[in-house]
Image: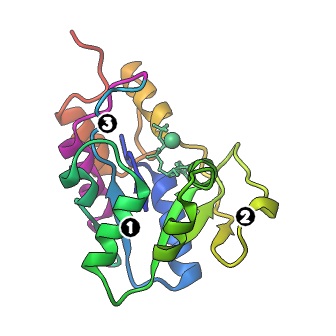
């Protein structure tokens, strides 16, 4: 499951858990994206902070793990590179790429979508306020999964921290603590 995870929140975790159970996956690997070269609108937190929050959030689940491939490659992340690297690391395994319906729609408009499908089966999870209709989806290569609606976004979490509002129970406890400890998402003093 790829994402910026700035921060990772319970919507991501519920979606991953749902897909893991539905597809009986051996493992769900969370892959935080690399650091964008030029910030598009806002600055993304340091890759290391996003990576550590993802580790903290997933540590207690024996079938969740975190990969550094996109972070260590550096720069903007392209899904095709992510999948190529994971395929190299797990050559015997069947890969599924889990993503939100919004991201899936973008991925499918890429020119090289066909190459992506050679590496993985794509699973789009529904997210509140965003529904994808499936009549443009290539059959057999993409599945849509309805997950329990959790109206949480990283953007909303960052804004809450900036306005001194709590993020308890929107993100795992350890992530609340980490955000506080590193003073992430606060206005510079
Ligand atoms: P931001 O608000 O910064 O865009 P985000 O909440 O969308 O952050 P990302 O790291 O961009 O988080 O998300 C990774 C993937 O998880 C995306 O494909 C996104 O659609 C999906 N996702 C995010 N929040 C939810 C949610 N509440 N339910 C289901 N899927 C979600
Ligand atoms: Mg997003």
Magenta part of the chain: 41-62
The answer to whether any part of residue 177 appears in the image is yes
Q: Which mark is residue 31?
A: none
Relative horizontal placement of residue 96, taking residue 37 as reference (left or right)? right
Look at 37% across and 46% down and name the residue there. Answer: 5
Residue 141 on image: x %, y %: 63, 74
Q: Which mark is residue 36?
A: 3
Check whether the beta carbons of the residues at disc 1 and disc 2 lie within 8 A of each other.
no
Q: Is residue 35 above or below residue 116?
A: above
Quadrant, the N terminus:
bottom left
Look at 42% across and 57% down and name the residue there. Answer: 79
Look at 62% across and 55% down and name the residue there. Answer: 108
How are the residues colored? Answer: rainbow
Residue under label 1, please give it.
83
Relative horizontal placement of residue 156, taking residue 182 as reference (left or right)? right
Relative horizontal placement of residue 22, taking residue 86 as reference (left or right)? right
Residue under label 2, please give it.
137
**Label 2 CA crowd tier, 10 Å (few <14, some 14–19, many 20+):** some
Q: Is residue 73 above or below residue 151?
A: below
Residue 187 on image: x %, y %: 30, 15
**Label 1 CA crowd tier, 10 Å (few <14, some 14–19, many 20+):** many
Nearest to N terminus: mark 3 or mark 2: 3
| 184 and 4: which is toward the camera | 4
Q: Quadrant of residue 162?
A: top left
Q: Secondary structure at mark 1?
A: helix
| 104 and 158: which is toward the camera | 104
Nearest to N terminus: mark 1 or mark 3: 3
Q: Secondary structure at mark 3?
A: loop
């Amino acid at each position: 499951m790829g994402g910026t995870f700035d921060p990772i929140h319970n919507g991501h975790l519920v979606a991953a858990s749902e897909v893991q159970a539905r597809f009986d996956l051996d493992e769900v690997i969370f892959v935080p994206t690399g650091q964008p070269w030029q910030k598009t609108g806002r600055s993304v937190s340091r890759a290391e902070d996003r990576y550590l929050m993802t580790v903290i959030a997933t540590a207690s689940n024996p079938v969740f793990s975190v990969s550094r491939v996109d972070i260590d490659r550096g720069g903007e992340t392209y899904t095709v590179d992510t999948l190529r690297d994971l395929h190299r690391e797990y050559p015997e395994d069947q890969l599924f790429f889990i993503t939100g319906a919004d991201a899936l729609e973008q991925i499918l408009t890429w020119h090289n979508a066909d190459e992506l499908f050679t590496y993985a089966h794509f699973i789009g999870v529904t997210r509140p306020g965003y529904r994808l209709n499936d009549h443009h989806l290539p059959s057999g290569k993409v599945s849509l999964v309805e997950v329990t609606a959790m109206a949480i976004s990283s953007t909303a979490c960052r804004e809450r921290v900036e306005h001194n509002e709590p993020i308890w129970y929107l993100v795992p406890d350890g992530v609340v603590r980490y955000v506080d400890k590193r003073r992430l998402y606060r206005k510079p003093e």
